[in-house]
Image (cartoon, rainbow, N blue to C red):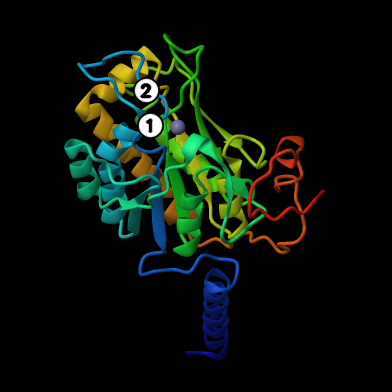
Amino acid sequence: MNKFTALVMTLLALLQFSCAQISGGPGSAPTGSAGGVVVLDIGHFTGAGGASTPGAVNGKRISECSWWYQYAYYTKKVIENAGYTCVVTNRGNRPTDPTLAAYADRAGVVQLNHPDKNAARYPSKYHPDRVASGMVSADYAISRKAACVVFLHHNSSGGWTSGASPSLIICNKYNGGRLADCLARTMEARILNHGMDNGGRGCSVSVRSKDADRSAGWMNACDDSGIPAAVIECAFLNNRNHANFLADDANARRYAEAVGHGVVKYMREHGSEPRHIRENEDKADEGSFGYAAESRSLNVPGAKRLLH
Ligand SMILES: [Zn+2]
């Protein structure tokens, strides 16, 4: 080995060392054996299941919540098969319906036992100026120092009872963009217009960053802790075409697996990138409780109000 080769090898070793320092240092999620825990949170809860199909499809009327109880298992499997640890959560209590309870067991659902009455908002344990209904799910992901969290929903809209419809991934402001993009591109490659009619249209990505907007508080709480978060709103459950697609077992599995492949794409391509963590918990940003007019008018017990 000549002097020049030795110098180059030393420099390469130093570079590798510094990259390892960056990816493992403050600002990035703590890494497990294969890059940290992925949290999948089933949206809504038994008794308040979210949107549902416009009528019985294949003999069933399906809610967002019950659909994901059945199929989150397949999303999780794809993520685990890629070498990552994956936890499925739901804010509600264990379902009493035996079929749903069996699905919960199969997916290993961690019940957070916090069904929110009338969508009441409450503060995050970790970021008490953030308020939302469903905050317990974000707090769980924060407690696990999750590599990312995906909230499993389906979209619905009064105007979309028939025909093709636009699909959407919602994400948090600072950390969620790449996760949402990986999910959107994967759903386009595997599902949208590939079995599930979407009128030839793709999937858009939208940032939700104000606590006053419906449910954004949990996205912001994740963001404050440097956790990428995304909400799956790709299929319109009250769209008859989409509902027909999702009511078919083989299609449903494929859809749920596509979400898993989107997560794996994110973890492989961006999972070790530095995270943006909120610097000052006493400084309001535009999303904070108390900032926007709507949340300013709310009286949420225990919430920390940064602006008056
Ligand atoms: Zn929903």
Q: Which residue is mark 2?
A: 52
Q: Is residue 233 above or below residue 33?
A: above
- In the picture, measured across the screen, residue 268 lies left or right of residue 250, that is right
- In the picture, measured across the screen, residue 193 lies left or right of residue 172, that is left
Identify the element where label 2 is drawn.
loop
Q: Is residue 251 above or below residue 121?
A: above
Q: Which residue is mark 1?
A: 49
Q: Is residue 252 above or below residue 277?
A: above
**How packed is label 1: few (under 14 Cα within 10 Å), some, or many (20 or more)?**
some
Of residue 213 and residue 279, the one placed in the foreground of this image is 213
Identify the element where label 1 is drawn.
loop
Residue at x-position 30% and y-position 49%? 76
> Is label 1 or label 2 in front?
1
Q: In the image as oriented, which residue stretches furthest toward the top?
A: 162
Whole-percent x and y of residue 219? 57, 46
Residue at x-position 56% and y-position 53%? 222
Give the residue type at disc 2.
Answer: Ser
Find ligand 1 in the image and state its quadrant.
Answer: top left
Whole-percent x and y of residue 136? 48, 52
Give the residue type at disc 1.
Answer: Gly
- Confirm or deny contact between disc 1 and disc 2 (CB under 8 A): yes
Of residue 124 and residue 247, the one placed in the foreground of this image is 124
For ligand 1, tell me if the residue under mark 1 lies within 8 Å. Answer: no
**How packed is label 2: few (under 14 Cα within 10 Å), some, or many (20 or more)?**
many
